[in-house]
Amino acid sequence: MVYDLNGTTLSTGGGSGMLNVLDHGFKGDGTTDNLAAFNALIAAHPAETLYFPKGVYAFSGKLVFDQCYMELDNAELKCTASTKVDRFIEIRGKMYPPETPQQDMFIRGNGKVNANFKADDCIAVARQKCTLIDHISIQNFQRYGICGKFEDASMGKEDGQTEANLSYELMVRNCLIETSLIYPDAVGIYDTGDSMYTDIVILNVKTALSCNGSSIFHNIHAWCYDFDNNDHDTKKALLENTVFAYIRVNGTRFSDCYCDTYQRGFKFYSGVSLVYLTNFKWYIAPNAWPTDLPAYVFPANPTGQAMYKVFGADIGGLGVSKFSDVDLSTQTNCRWYGIVHNLSDAPSTLQ
C-alpha cells in the first residue's frame, strides 16, 4: 500500500493493505490487555500497516515495531504496565545491510499515545531514517515524550558494522506533547540531530526541547499552565528550572516559536554558545508568575559566550526581567542580531 505524504511516497511493502486490529483479537475497551495480540499480529504480518479504529487499546508492556506502520483513527494506545517500563513504543530496525537504518516507518492519524505515567519515554526511535510521527497526541510520560535515538544492550556492531545505531531525519508534525510539571527530568522532544519538527504544541513539560545543532524547529508553542491553582511555594517549585530549549550542540535553528511561561528561554550545554532564531516570542503573564522567581529569556551561558542570532524577535513579559545578564554594553561576546519589535524591552544599546 502506498501513501503520498506532502509529496513523499511511502510504501508499507507488498502486503494486502491495512490490517484492522479488531479482526485480529484486539479489544478497544480500555481494559483488555492487547499486548499478546499485538506481538502475534506483527509476527504473522510483518511490514504491514496496523489500523486502529476508535477505541482505547490497553497494553501491559512496551510495543516494539520493526518494519511496521500504524494508523490511528480516533484511537488511543494506553500503557497499563504494572511496573514502569523504560519506553512505551519503540520504533526500531535491524541496521541491515550494514550501516543502513530502516526507513519510512510511521505513526500517524487522529489518535493518542498515552504512556499513562507508567513509562519513562512515550515514543522512542532507534536505527531509523525518515520516521514520521504525524497528528498524534503524546501524553503522560516521565522522561521523554519523543526520543530521537535510544541505545540498549541489543545494539551490537555485528555483521561488520562500524556504527551500531544510526538514527536520524525524524519528521514530527502537527502533534500535541503533554505531561505534568511534577516530573523534573521530563523533556518534550529529545532531539538527536538532522531532524525536522513542525507545528507542535508542548504543554506542562519541564524542558520543552533538548536540541542537537543540526535540527530545525518551526512553529513550536511551549506553555506551562498547570500551576495556576497552587499556593505560592508550590507554584514556584513547579516553574523553577523550566526551560524552553536546552541547546546541546551549536547551531540549532528556530522559526516562529512561542515560549509561554517558562523561567528560561534557553540553556546551553558546557562549551555550546550559538542558536539561530527567527520571529521568536517569549511571554509571561505577571499575575500568574511568582514575583520572587527571576525569569530569563536569553541568559548568558556560564562562560559568557552566548550568541543569539535573532531576527524579528517579540519579547513580552509586562515587567518581568527580559534579558537577564545579557547586556550588549558590557558582554562583548554576547551578540544580538536583527530587530526587536518592542524597543522598550530591548537593551539600551538598541534603543
Image: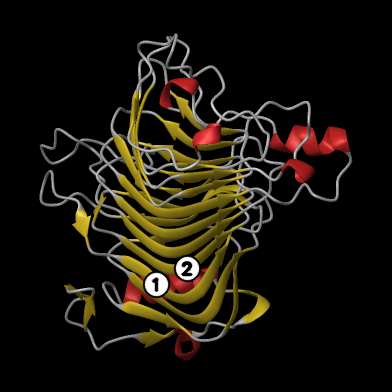
Taking 121 as reference, is 343 above or below it?
above
In primary-sequence order, the first of circles 1 and 2 is 1
User: Are discs 1 and 2 less than 8 Å apart at CB?
Assistant: yes
Question: Where residue 340 sits: x, y (%)?
Answer: 43, 38
**In this orientation, which residue lies closer to the viewer: 111 or 66?**
111
Total of numbered circles in the picture? 2
Q: How far is mark 1 from mark 2, CA to CA? A: 6 Å
Residue neighbourhood size for the residue with mark 1, other residues' Cα within 10 Å, grouped as few (<14), some (14–19), many (≥20): many
Say which mark, if any, is on residue 136. Answer: 2
Could you tell me which quadrant the N terminus lies in?
A: bottom left
Name the residue located 48 percent from the left edge and 17 percent from the top edge.
327
Name the residue located 50 percent from the left edge and 40 percent from the top edge.
342
Taking 256 as reference, is 182 above or below it?
above
Residue 220 shown left or right of residue 230 in the figure: left
**What residue is shown with label 1?**
108
Question: Where residue 62 sits: x, y (%)?
Answer: 51, 57
Name the residue located 64 percent from the left edge and 49 percent from the top edge.
204
Element under disc 2: strand
**In this orientation, which residue lies closer to the viewer: 123 or 181?**
181
Taking 346 as reference, is 95 above or below it?
below
Element under disc 1: strand
Say which mark, if any, is on residue 315. Answer: none
Residue neighbourhood size for the residue with mark 2, other residues' Cα within 10 Å, grouped as few (<14), some (14–19), many (≥20): many
Question: Where residue 12 sits: x, y (%)?
Answer: 23, 76
**In this orientation, which residue lies closer to the viewer: 142 or 292?**
292
Taking 7 as reference, is 225 above or below it?
above
Q: Quadrant of residue 313?
A: top left
Q: Which kind of residue does numbered mark 2 sit on? A: Ile
Q: Which kind of residue does numbered mark 1 sit on? A: Arg
